Image (spheres, rainbow, N blue to C red):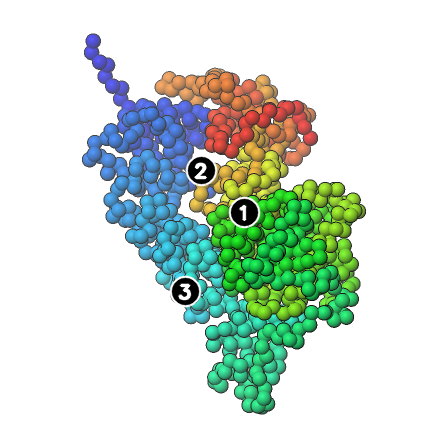
Amino acid sequence: MSQAPRPVGVDPGDLRDRLFELWTCKDMEGLRLVAAKGFSELGEPLAGLLEVLEGCPGSQKGKPSTLGQFILGEFLRWRPQKPQASLIRLPAELVPGLQRQALGLICDSRPGHMEPLLEIYQLGSLESGVLLKHVGYLWDCCSYREAALLAMKLDLQADLDMDKMCVPLVLLDKLPLAEAYVKGSPELQDRLVTTLDSWCSPQFSLDELRRQYPRLCLSKHQTDQIHPKMIVKHVFRLMEKFNIDPAKCSNSVHKRKLDSLRFLMMMHFREGRMSEENWSDHVQATVEGSLELQVQLVELLVRHSTLQQAAEWAHYYNLPRNRLPFGVWETIQSLPPSQPGVAPVCCPSSDLWEPSQNHQQRYYQLPVARDDVHFLSTLEQLELCQQTVMQPGAVVGVDMEWRAGFGTTSQQRVALIQLAVPGSVFLLDLCAPGIRQDPQTIRFIRELLSHKNILKLGYGMSGDLRSLVATWPEFSEEPPKVDGLLDLLQVHQKIQMSRRGCEGGRRSVEVGDAGGGGRGTAEKGLSLLVQQLLGRPLDKQEQLSNWERRPLRCSQLRYAAADACCLLDVYSVLKANPARFGLPADLRSVAHGPADSGKTKGERTPKDKSRKGRKKTREQKDSEQAPAVGTLAHRLGPSDVEGPSVCPRELRVVCDNMLQGLGRFLRCLGVDVVILENEDDHKEAAKLARTEDRVILTSGQPYQTLKSQVAEGRCLALDCTDKARDQAAQVIRHFHVRLTRHDIFSRCQACNNDEYLRLPQTAMTHLMKERGLVPEQAPPSEEVWDDHYEPLAPYNSWRDPQDPSFTPRCRWAPEGALDSQTLGFPSGAVVQLETVPPGLLPRIPEFFVCTGCGKVFWEGTHFDRVLSQFQDLLHISEDAPSTAPRA
């Protein structure tokens, strides 16, 4: 019996035309069936796929995906277990030609083609010269993003000019992509950071730089980002991220120190918020070793103070005469011969332990005697502290101090740890050589933090814990478990909300001046809590001290001890009558909210973000935001810590316009998402976050601006080079979202509404026939399909009976919500009947209509695809919810 001849394959052009017709009709189920059948009937699938793709239209404005992307996705799903779709079976001489043809399809007009083509055609095996040539072609076409992404996918960075590839990305406000480009290469990281630093030089000219890229068109927003102030921020951030020596970034360091010098002038001379000793100490540390900064100091003193003081500092630094402002040299000559110049910074002999009478009347006073304040600088003294503190059932006030860097240092290392118990205060000196890095010290702090039977009291502890991690790398390698911690910041926020009768939202812990004298400024944070409960606020004059200078002044020691002792007194008052303050009997049950947002306005924050001197907490880097305070979540990220889970509908976010794809994906998972439009300013995200209590999801440079406008932990940065699915998975894990199958499609992807109207098949058919949307002369199956293709499978025939059904956790609209005449809802939306392919009507028993925009949905393979994509995040053991309408 002779073998039947092999059938002639389907023409790729005909297949493309059929797919385009179905794509236009938005018949996605039909598309999938036709694509799978067409791939199987192509004579040569790999060559035919390229022919199909070459004739597909490119990206279109207003449409997030293209037909080519859809075809590639379906081909990848069809390809497994299909030997005819493998390069291995092709003659070796044909493979390079197909690979070059596939490489030519990678361009900016065909988004989403790069990764599938790289995988299907194994483009990484092509000669590097061919690949580099195509990268150069994309760059010449001004497709800078695609050129960089292709180079990254193929590991070609070492063979390309870093400046040529990355400078256009930075100019186009795509710095995160440039950071990803240099990832893993210290040499390229060094060059990127030093290049950015050169843009902070006084000789830098943006116009001259733009002339090197004449075809690069920048918007006003992009041009505004190339500002020294913004560039310095990025340089310091990248210096920390890539561990770059600050000596290589002299321009940025000089500018940051000059800004710090100006800030110190304002704090001391205009606002009077810094003592003479602290101001002098910080000034010397800022201008040390820099003639230019010393000259700037003298010029600023002439402007803000007197010629006398300017002359004293000029004499102290022995500045050359030709660099001095007018009148300073003459004043130096008139100084008395015995004039010692600038006084020493620390004068312990003139610093008394007992505060003045006025101080005692205005501020909270340390409740222990001088002899009960123990300054620990040896291991023997540390052992005494351990014996006292490490007692089960003990209550310990914990605080930490570090030197305010005013933005010139990216990491703050703890200089002093204060531990207060009733009757004693221990000040652990981490600047002592034998203490800071000794294993006994690290072990003691680790055991204290993790001891569940010792109650640790703190206020906004996340900043302290971050600095502790920066102090001891051991904490980064093996994070300590934090147990038995009561953060009084959370308690304070609860008190504030109870006082305002506003249990529905978090409020900042600050009020106006309580009439206690002073300069009329508000008491904030811990000082406010102490004032509210104990009658007088804390004296914060020493807050911005140089805590690394030894010996410490008596006023510094008194301040440090009082900061820890007051926690014990506050806890004692709260514990005596918690109901008076609207608190539960068990103070430890006060839930920890997302990060210590109140500390944004608290008084410990100048140490966290002293660069600007504003009392706002230094926010975390991209991967360092998390909801729990006592678990080092701010540093570790969500995968390393456990926190209370929330359901998707409880998570409210606003997506920046660079993450619109992520926003639609999160809506698909049931998250409440507001998505900014392309024309919206990034600041709109901060406004929505504050007014609607949302978390900002952003990427790139806007993160640096947005994070300073909202509470800590309320702004999350994501990698814009990641796929939307991966970004969504990161968000779900970060916020400990408990995702179930009932959350899938429980919210409209188009408008974010979570209310649907059920329309049975008969009702939908009747409505469409009434409006002439269903031709009556032929069955629906004959409208779309001809004899060459199989009819669509019956509804749900593709699903195993054991598979989960579509039961979304949403609100159901009553039948009367739809006006039968206008097909409108109370929201003004009208049912979009024209989007329903008539061929679906006989096979879909039930449709779902969004009452917010009128969009029509029905159950299909997309539901199962999303289930499979997030299978690792789903908690499918949860019982199915009731499908009854709920409010």
Which is more foreground, mark 3 or mark 1? 1
Of mark 1 and mark 2, the one earlier in the sequence is: 2
Residue 457 image point, x, y percent: 66, 51
Circle 2 Cα neighbour tier, 10 Å, few/some/many (<14 / 14–19 / ≥20): some
Residue 244 horizontal side relative to residue 549, left or right: left
Identify residue for label 3: 248
Circle 3 Cα neighbour tier, 10 Å, few/some/many (<14 / 14–19 / ≥20): some
Secondary structure type for disc 3: helix
Residue 842 vs 738, above or below: the answer is above
Residue 360 horizontal side relative to residue 131, left or right: right
* Any part of residue 804 in sight: yes
Q: Nearer the viewer, residue 115 or 294?
A: 294
Of mark 2 and mark 3, the one earlier in the sequence is: 2
Identify residue for label 2: 65
Mark 1–mark 2 Cα distance, whole angstroms, equals: 45 Å
Could you say which quadrant of the image residue 192 lies in?
bottom left
Identify residue for label 1: 480
Of mark 3 and mark 1, the one earlier in the sequence is: 3
Which residue: 66% across, 42% down? 591
Residue 631 image point, x, y percent: 57, 46
Q: Amino acid at mark 1?
A: Pro
